[in-house]
Image: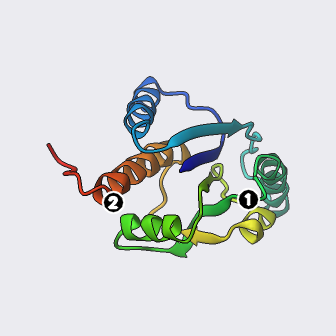
Amino acid sequence: MKITLVTVGKIKEKYLEAAIAEYSKRLGRYCRLEIVQVADEKTPDKASELQEAQIRDKEGERILAHIKEDAYVIALAIDGKQRSSEAAWMEDLGVRGESHLQFIIGGSLGLSQAVLKRADTKISFSRLTFPHQLMRVILLEQIYRSFRIIKGEPYHK
């Protein structure tokens, strides 16, 4: 299975880079992982709703340029479906023949309507809001956990 994360913005903190590198290494046993970072837009202080929508649209165009036609697209959105087990859901996608999953993590303002419309599904890890850079680590950990469960391997050592 191929897993692609399409994300907005660059990671600036070394500790997040280290965590992403660790989970990327661990996931190498289970899938081909690719992380694509697209440029983020600067958001002015006290941006209007129109400005925020324009920023989401610009970032959305960059995201959509990396979406593959044959991929199953999963957008991370606060109003997405919460699941009790990502493992069962991911295993079901594999059984259905989905060989390329693309997870989309938007910028600080979220995802554009065009990206949400293109997504095959929307998921949420919580009703809480997490920094989009930290969400990469959380997502990779959940994907890793899912593969361990699917393979019947213990997660905690």
Image position, residue 64 (x, y; %): 80, 53
Q: Do the residues labelled 2 and 1 touch (CB within 8 Å)?
A: no
Residue at image location 66% in from the left, 62% down from the top:
73
Q: Mark 2 points at which residue?
A: 150
- Which corner quadrant of the image does residue 29 belong to? top left
Which amino acid, by three-letter code, is at mark 2? Ile
Residue at image location 59% in from the left, 57% down from the top:
99
Q: How is the image coloured?
A: rainbow
Label 1 sits on a secondary structure element that is loop
Question: What's the CA distance linking mark 2 and mark 1?
Answer: 23 Å
Q: Can residue 33 be seen in this view?
A: yes
Which amino acid, by three-letter code, is at mark 1? Asp
Depth order, front residue of 150/57: 150
State which quarter of the image contains the C terminus. Answer: top left
Q: Residues within 10 Å of mark 2 (few under 14, many from 20)?
A: some
On the rendered structure, is 74 left or right of 25?
right
Image position, residue 11 (x, y; %): 56, 31
Q: Is residue 126 visible?
A: no
Q: In this view, does 64 lie above or below 10?
A: below
Disc nearer the start of the sequence (2/1):
1
Q: How crowded is mark 1: few (under 14 residues within 10 Å), some or many (20 or more)?
A: few
Residue at image location 77% in from the left, 46% down from the top:
66
Q: Name the residue under label 1.
A: 70
Q: Which mark is residue 126?
A: none
Label 2 sits on a secondary structure element that is helix
Image position, residue 116 (x, y; %): 72, 67
- Which corner quadrant of the image does residue 120 belong to? bottom right
Residue at image location 75% in from the left, 39% down from the top:
42
Image position, residue 59 (x, y; %): 78, 48
